Amino acid sequence: MKGQVISGKFGEIIIRQKSNEEFELGELLIAEKEKTKILLQIYELAYGSQISQQNLELISGMRLEENLNIDFFDEKLRNYKIAFAKSLITIGENVKTSKVLPEFFSEVREIKDNDLIFLKKPSNPLFIGNLRTGSKVMNLPIFLRGKDVLSHHILLPASTGKGKSNLTSVMLWNLIEEDYCGLLVLDPHDEYYGRNGLGLKDHQKKEKVSYYTAENVPVGCRTLKINLKTLNPSHFGFMEWSIPQKDAISLFYKKFGEKWIESIILEKPIENIQESTLSVIKRRLMNLLDLEFDGQKLYCKGVFDLNSGETTIKDIVKELEQSKIVIIDTSSFPSNLEILIGSLITSETFRMYKHYKNKGELKDKPVISIVIEEAPRVIGKDVLEKGSNIFSTIAREGRKFKIGLIAITQLPSLIPREVLANMNTKIILGMEMAPERQAIIESASQDLSSDSRNIAALDKGEAIVTSNFTSFAIPVKIPLFRNIVKENQVSKIKKDFSGINIE
């Protein structure tokens, strides 16, 4: 026994701590009621005493100032700690949202692995970490229903240094084993493949990982080259254009088709377009696409090219349909170029999956999820006020076509509330800033109204998983990615060695 229920109300159950025990913020407890168990979670801690505050201050002063040892009361009985807890679920023949209070004076105990045997590994698993109670990690891996979770969007909100990249790496590593999903990873820090360290390249099934980069291409990987002809005006929806500029771009695309960019750079004449408007469009496109024009010939210096890369986008989409993880190294690109490339691939994926749905073939296709960091760049309030883009379209409609987002951000408050609400799974890591915590709490799938302090207190690698596909908000501890890779390597060595015959 760790404590005893002494009072409270629904959502605020007050538990007195036993003197030789210790409560922690976020700790899970069990209160038994007839043939059921009520799962409780601590969200606040406080001191309690049978001695008045005035007398407590007097005793403290006498100890501090006079060095007197005053032991005229039984300290274990008169002074104690109390925890404020909320009911999460009631566990009986079925698991359901808790609607009852524990019995008055009922004992509470720490949770055990067999209390949550209903948290079984689903058929399409997405591993997140191990169950956590307070800071104690339990031997109970937490798996989400991957097909549902990925197609209905995941939000990873966290302050800097709380483990967003580690969590993403852990999820990607485990998804390599699965065939129900493909993932497009826009990697602005070039960290997931592991070009210069541990990464997905170290997985035993590394053939399921495709890596595209524009510079110093490793052996077995692919050069990122995209033909200019694959671009159309819709791919630039994330950029702010004036109405005359939009009209001019539309006219060029209508007249010149797939050569519309080249025609703008070459300043081919079209009636009713002002020279100043065309000049601005030309300059912005040349800067973004890294193009040069010497007055006669157009030169491509960066990712985009006139003579190669015709099938790059289609190749990437095909790999996603084959349940591969496709990593695009965007570390050498400015932010708007990264978004453009992501928009190109995502638009083609969305187009193909809509086509499959219309033909009745979508059910046979894997879920596809797009991992994008600093998500407010494409689904933030300021961006969406200027118009929609492919990422906001997927946030609204993607689930109907088995396409989802894994949106990573430090600032969820910049994302509109209706978009946050569409992110049906949130894996919340530590967040110190109150406005950011509040944005998450208000859009969570479970009631987290009393968890603001708990979220602020999360250490690196600790998280709370709130989802439409879980029965309660689950506290987890995410393992270190480097430990997973090293354990995998040790396991492989042992397996290889066990097959050697020594005579």
Image (cartoon, rainbow, N blue to C red):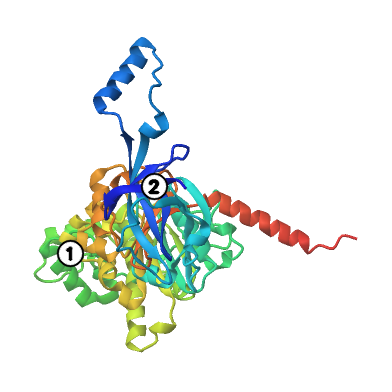
The residue located at (26%, 76%) in the rendering is 257
Please give the count of numbered marks on the rendered protein.
2
Judged from this view, the residue extending furthest toward the right is 503
Q: Position of residue 361 (x, y in %)?
A: 40, 86
Judged from this view, the residue extending furthest toward the top is 66
Q: Position of residue 88 (x, y in %)?
A: 35, 59
Q: Position of residue 158 (x, y in %)?
A: 35, 49
Q: Which mark is residue 387?
A: 1
**In front: mark 1 or mark 2?**
2
- Say whether residue 295 is left or right of residue 18: left
Give the amino acid at mark 1: Gly
Front-most of residues 266 and 45: 45
Give the amino acid at mark 2: Gln
74 over 423 or under it: above or below: above
Dot 1 lies on which element?
A: loop
Comes first in the chain, label 1 or label 2:
2
Write down the quadrant of residue 139 in the picture: bottom right
Contact, CB < 8 Å: mark 1 with mark 2? Answer: no
Judged from this view, the residue extending furthest toward the bottom is 359
- Say whether residue 490 is left or right of residue 377: right
| Residue 291 appears in the picture as rendered | no
Label 2 environment density (alpha carbons within 10 Å; few <14, some 14–19, many ≥20):
many
Q: Which mark is residue 364?
A: none
List the residue tagged with mark 2.
Answer: 4
Front-most of residues 30 and 69: 69
- Say whether residue 256 is left or right of residue 48: left
Q: Position of residue 409 (x, y in %)?
A: 32, 52
18 over 58 or under it: above or below: below
Dot 2 lies on which element?
A: strand
Write down the quadrant of residue 420 in the picture: bottom left
Write down the quadrant of residue 364 in the picture: bottom left
Q: CA distance from mark 1 to mark 2?
A: 56 Å
